Every structure is written in structure tokens, then in C-alpha cells.
Image: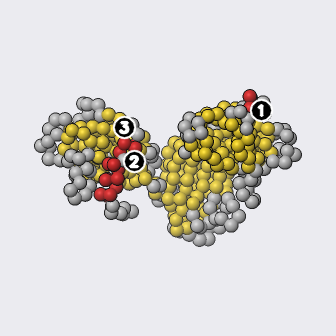
Amino acid sequence: MKRNRTGWLVMILIFAVGAAGMGQCFTEVEDNDSGALADFVADLPGSGCIDGSIGVVGDIDFFYFDLSSPRWVLIETITNEDTEIALLDADGNLIAQNDDVALNVYSSGIEQYLLTGQYFVAVWEHGDDNVIYSYTLSVSTEGCAEEYEDNDSLGLADYLGQFPGEACVSGTIGVVGDTDFFSFEVLDWTVLTISTVTNEDTEIALLDEFGDVIAVNDDYIIGEYWSWIEEEVPPGTYYVMVWEHGDDNVIYDYSLFVTGISCISEIEPNDDSILADDMGAVPGQLCATGAIDVIGDLDYYRFEVDVATYVTISTATTGDTEIALFDEFGNTLVVNDDVSVGDTSSWIGIDLAAGVYYVAVREFTGTDWIPSYTLYVTGD
């Protein structure tokens, strides 16, 4: 796929102005003038950066990053001086090289689609006749991975990475009857959310390492063709299958999203705020799995907000939940029954100041059980 590189100059200028917003960068540790001595930059997907210099004429700095799922990777230097960079594979073979990212701009940039693996970046002063007092090397991923055919069996499945974590991949069902397989590893008990984004009619299945079906879904919502599965799974290897529902048409494009977070398990009794199960702190994503296994049961969970943030609280369940949010003094802030007509899960979105908060979960009518639910608390 050919990428559009128009606008690189604007990107560099914007990035340079906002470089302080990247967060804390690593600092180069000399001697790093070979692949064996390379400094670590980042685990990708994601982003990372490192500050360095070419302190001696002829110096060359080596850095490395690990990529756990195929992705477009952007590598760039932010500097007023004349860098040159090269991207190398794990064996030291040259993949791409760049001097100036644009006319009269001395920073360097490479944008390359890479498969899972370890990669090296070399940075030096163009011409090897001057020093560079300071530069920042940034590596980041963008967009989704791209499906790599042929992936129509477990043995040929495209690898998505490790979970808890998140991954996405873009694909097609280009031939009637085609099936796409993707694999991933789960390192700890994890709640997986697997979904497609498409205007066409996908169907998906989650399989264990032996190829046995754990869960399957066609349409998540009546009238919508995208698919959705939520399942809590133990550590192991798993697969996702994607195909066109009915096997009688093609799908020109879809995106598959896999998100996994490690949840706490409800510990009874937790039927008041004093006994609330502790979920942790936001910003971040928290979750808990529970059940209303006694009619009239009420489950309480506690979480902290470290800095003022917008928080969403939701349940995923086939039962009819109702949730309420309380402050640390027990004052009710907001209550929700159903997300929407026909969806009996619950959802709250609210701006919260730093502090301690509680969520209560119950069966809406108080006259039925809920075999299982997952409670999510997310702060951006």
C-alpha cells in the first residue's frame, strides 16, 4: 500500500512545537555505536522517544524498538541540525534510509509498514563532518495492521500480539467463502472485547488453541451488520475467525478490534460501600466481573480518581442491570438503567474531580438474577 507523504513538513513543524507534550523521553547512554550496544526506545504499538547527541564527528548512535503486531511505524528526529537515519531489521539489514524529511528541513523521517519483530535505528550527522548538540528520536505507530494473506487457517493466522492490551487489523473478504484467521496470546486472566467495524455483514468467532469455538456472533445489534464478542479467558493462545455471514458475498473492507483488560473478580459480601471491592484508580481502564446470584443482591465497587477526568462507567451483560454512582460521602451523583432501547446494559458518563467514588450494581427490577456481568470504569 502506497502511503501519502504530503504534509510531512507540517507534521514535523507541529511535532517540534509540541515535543514537550510527548512525555518524558529516555536519554541516550553512550557507548551505543553498534547494534549490540543499542539503547532501547519503545515497545510498540504505542510510542516512545529518546534524547541524544552526536558529540564527536563521525559518531553514530544506535537504538532499538520491539513491535508486537504488524503496523505502520513512523520514525523521526526532532532537531535544528542535520541528522540522517536508517532503519534496520534484527539482522542489521537496511530497510529504509532518510536524510531530510523535506526541503530546507534537516530533521529526518521514515514511515514504514513493519511485521512483528525487533528493529534498529541508526542516527548520525549527515556528511560526518560536524557534531549535533541535541536531537530527539521519536518512534510511534499509526492506524491498524493490515491483513496478510494467505491467512485462511489456524496455521496461517496473522499474529496480533499479547494481551492484556489492544490491537486492530484491517482486512477484506475478497473471495466468496474466504475466512480470515488471527492469533494472539493471553498472559493473564483477561476480559476480551472483539468487534468488527464495517458496513458489510461480518460474522466472527473466538477459538481456543485447539480450534474449538468459545463464542460466535453475527450481528451485535438488530439492523447493524458489525459483530461483537465479550469473553473472559484464562492465559493461553487464541484465534479469531472473520467471514462474511452466509458465505455468499465479499466484504470490501473491515477493521477487527481486539481489546483485553485484566479484571478483578467480585468478592462477596460486597453489598455496601464499607465492603466494596477495590477496582483501582483512573485515568486508565478498570473492570470487574460479578453476578447478581441472589434476588435483591447489591454489589458495590470502589475506585479512585487521581486527577480530574471524564469517566465512563458501564456494564456488559445479557441481564438487566442498573448502576448508581456515589461520592465518598454516599451522595448519589447519577443513576442509569439501560444504555438504550433494547440494550439492558447500563452506562454513565460524567466529569469527576479527584477523590474516592463508589459504583453499585443491581438487577433493575430486584426480582431476577444476573448470571454474570462485567463492570467497566474508564477515565481518559
Structural distance between the alpha carbons of marks 3 and 2: 13 Å
* Colouring scheme, one of rainbow, by chain, secondary structure, one colour: secondary structure
Disc 2 marks which amino acid?
Ser
Q: Mark 2 points at which residue?
A: 140
Other residues around mark 3 within 10 Å, as few (<14) / some (14–19) / many (≥20):
some
Q: Which of marks 2 and 1 is in front?
A: 1
Disc 1: which residue: 272
Tell me the quarter of the image containing the C terminus: top right
Q: Measuring from the top left, give residue 260's x and y in whole percent.
A: 58, 44
Question: Can you see residue 155?
Answer: no
Splitting the image into 4 quarters, where does residue 289 fall?
Answer: top right
Q: Which of 128 and 7 is in front in this view?
A: 7
Disc on the earlier residue, 3 or 2: 3
- Residue 196 higher or lower than 368, as above or below: below
How many neighbours does mark 1 have within 10 angstroms: few (below 14), some (14-19), or many (20 or more)?
some
The residue positioned farthest toward the top in the image shown: 274
Mark 1, mark 3: which one is toward the viewer?
Answer: 1
> Going by the image, does 149 lie left or right of 238?
left
| Residue pointed to by mark 3 | 25
Q: Which quarter of the picture shows residue 3?
A: bottom left
Residue at the left extreme? 129
Q: Split into 4 quadrants, where in the image is the N terminus?
A: bottom left
Label 2 – label 1 distance at C-alpha:
45 Å
Please name the residue shown 26% across and 50% down the image: 108
Image coordinates of residue 229 in percent, x first then y, are 65, 52
Give the structural element (helix, strand or loop) at label 3. Answer: loop
